[in-house]
Image: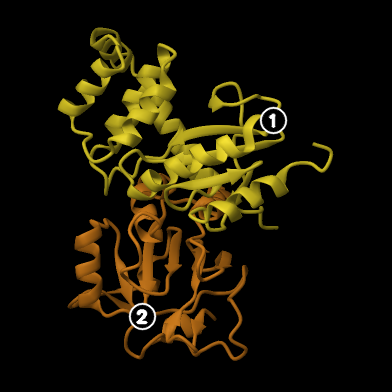
Amino acid sequence: MTREQGRLNPPVGAQDHAQGSAGAAIALVEYGDYECPHCGRAYPIVKRLQARLGAGLLFVFRNFPLAEVHPHATAAAELAEAAAMGGRFWPMHDMLFEHQDALDDGHLLTYVRALDLDPGDLRKALESGRPKERVRADFTSGVRSGVNGTPTFFINGRRFDGNWTDEDSFAAALRAAAPPSS
Amino acid sequence: MTANARADGSLLAAGARAPEFVLPREPGATVSLRSLRGRPVVLAFYPADWSPVCGDQMALYNEILPEFQALGAELFGISVDGAWCHVAFRETRRLRFPLLADFEPKGAVARAYGVYRAQDGTSERALFVLDGDGIVRWSYLSPIEVNPGADGILDALEGLGGRRTA
């Protein structure tokens, strides 16, 4: 009678921020927090896995800011979502993880400038309320999917409870998730 | 005032009456399960205070607390740590829900719910959702190293549906 725990809900879809081809055999979804040091450690690992697995891997990032322990996490997440409204999600995502020790408002503004984004446009995007809504929706979907901390990864819709810090075994788990024909 | 240990040590399952208990919720103050009748109760047994920060189960529930409250439920963490240890842990992690001290006699409540780990002297990582009548409506034993998340709890609370009174 118990529903299986740790199933991604909703599945990867058009609303997601994704890198790679939509038809990839393996979909890796991360629920992360820009201020979480573990997510900071995961960031280069994911980059290397993307390089290793190439076109076979679709990578999706969803927000799961732990606001109680990370005071800047929500603002950072909303900024990335605001950048996304202008088509610049990934550059901001990368910038935030590469500077995750300095996420106060003053630093966020320097990242906006460094990426040649217009602060006025971003302010308008933030004021529209859509980034906030988006971050909250991601968080809720994470809770319903069995996210149990950050980062939490899902491989083809199933929560990965293995050790993501071991890059080789993470890569092996990803490869094992691909259908045999691919 | 605590029920006896489960003879076979197995997890208390849905349909069972939840064993009553009175435990410290902070130094000098106790909570009795019976006093919580009329609203759903979530009991989250975990092995010990002071596990690593970001992946910590109690920190996660702290973030999700508004969702539990929206469903009318009262959430309690419970471990064999003492009340003063819980105070320090709650303050450090800024937890906004109570942690019960199953400390003396050690693990008695965990034993009554079938979730004591004698080899480690801690409880298992286990979840119970009780309805407003004190009946277990859902229980789950997690592998000790896996934080079970909250999806199962929320599903179970929603499943109580019309029994919600808060």
Residue B138 visible, this angle: yes
Asked if residue A58 is positioned above or below residue A118 in the image, the reply reads below
Image quadrant in which you'd find residue A100:
top left
* Residue B134 rendering spot, x and y as whole percentages: 49, 68
Question: Residue tagged by mark 1?
Answer: A24
Secondary-structure class at tag 1 = loop
Pick whichever, A41 or A168, lies toward us. Answer: A168
Q: Which chain is yellow?
A: A
Distance (Cα) linking label 2 and label 1: 47 Å
Q: Which chain is orange?
A: B
Question: Is B115 situated left or right of A23 in this image?
Answer: left
- Which residue is located at x 44 percent, y 66 percent? B44
Pick whichever, B2 or A71, lies toward us. Answer: A71
Question: Residue tagged by mark 2?
Answer: B80
Residue A6 visible, this angle: no
Q: Have a look at marks 2 and 1 and say if they share a chain.
A: no
* Residue B127 rendering spot, x and y as whole percentages: 50, 66
Secondary-structure class at tag 2 = loop
**Chain of residue at mark 2:** B
- Which residue is located at x 56 percent, y 36 percent? A50
Question: Is A164 situated left or right of B77 in this image?
Answer: right
Question: Is A101 situated left or right of B21 in this image?
Answer: left
Asked if residue A24 is positioned above or below residue B3 in the image, the reply reads above
Asked if residue B140 is positioned above or below residue A49 in the image, the reply reads below
Mark 2 burial class by Cα count in 10 Å: few <14, some 14-19, many 20+: many
Residue A2 badge: none
